[in-house]
Image (tube, grey):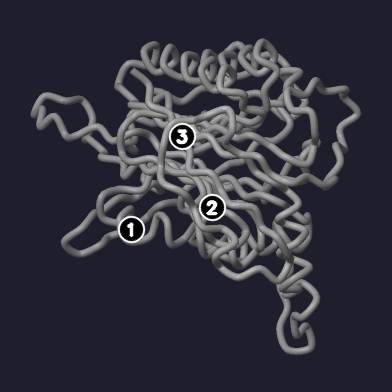
Amino acid sequence: QMRLANRPVALWFSAAASASAFLPTSLGLVHPSVGAVSRSRFGALKSKTSLRMSSSSTNSMKVALCQFHVTPDKETNHNTAKSYLEKAKAGGADLVVLPEIWNSPYATAAFPEYAEKLPQVGDKESESSSPKLLLDAAKEHNLWIVGGSVPEVVKEDNGETKIYNTCLVLNPEGEVVAKHRKVHLFDIDVPGGITFFESETLSPGEGMTHFSTPFGEIGLGICYDIRFPEYAMLLREKYNCVALIYPGAFNLTTGPAHWELLQRGRAVDNQCYVMMASPARTEDPKDENAKYPHYTAWGHSTVVSPWGEVISTIDEKEGIVFADLDLEKVEEMRAGIPIGNQKREDMYCLKEV
């Protein structure tokens, strides 16, 4: 049975509010009274497409982070993702986020086998099974979908084949509005912890990614991208993002130490909401005959407020994290502590190259 997680946020009464303004209540089941927040106008849709909205106001957004088990069977993963998207819609979500690498085992050796050709921004159709599922679900359920990530195969003009860790974003018309290829590859060797080198198989992306919605501009990264504050700062400073989303799959070494810390850091740095959606934890089956090595995800999909408070989260098990985001809080935070206008650009600067 699917568990629903929601930790509602207290109202923020003033721009100069103290830390108590975002005190979370205890974790519990979603209730119709959860998420009663004040509202104001923030952000506008840049797309020419007329979009149908499930919320009555563009100043609040209900998000759903889907955390589920990923198996070696792609069809099983597709059925799971489809079911979670349906349940997220039934829970009233405007925008749904899937986890990193949700159609494949998280193993560098597995990526080429599970990789698919993905559509481009502006496309509404795909012959590949994973993006087709997302395109169809977005249109059927009238949802914004941040499609976690899947391995993408690309045939270059020179005949070279490249594999990317790629996230597609779909609007409620079933159109691809953004495509992010993981910029920073997860190449680490922690003594006594974990050794993992995505670069053994994957190529890095070359661009920053953000997309326009009726709720405001939203920035996008994948997992390891969150460790690089400059990337997030550019999304906030240059594109005025009100939220940053990172599908991710931290492990049992980095997860306990840094998963929540990094999200809270990026939220406070950029005075915006930050979200990370993880696969649910699957314990190592210790199968010597397994085709690919097992990766144990940390789980704990989480939403963090502009004040740096965790407002909704879950443990390592399967479930959906729901959160009501009051976008007025972004404006209030930036007005009350105006670090965006106080930078010493005579001493330092940040630029996109």
Judging by the rendered image, the residue that carries numbered circle 1 is: 188
Using the numbered discs, state the Cα–Cα distance from disc 2 to disc 1 in whole angstroms. 26 Å
- The image quadrant of residue 258 is bottom left
- The label on residue 99 is 3
Using the numbered discs, state the Cα–Cα distance from disc 2 to disc 3 in whole angstroms. 17 Å
Residue type of the residue flagged with mark 3: Pro
Q: How many marks?
A: 3
Nearest-to-viewer mark from 2 and 3: 2
Q: Position of residue 19 (x, y in %)?
A: 56, 68
Q: Are marks 3 and 1 in contact (CB under 8 Å)?
A: no
The foreground one among 322 and 194 is 322
Q: Position of residue 23 (x, y in %)?
A: 51, 58
Q: Does residue 203 appear anywhere in the picture?
A: no
| Residue 62 sits above or below residue 18 on the image | above
Residue type of the residue flagged with mark 2: Val
- The image quadrant of residue 97 is top right
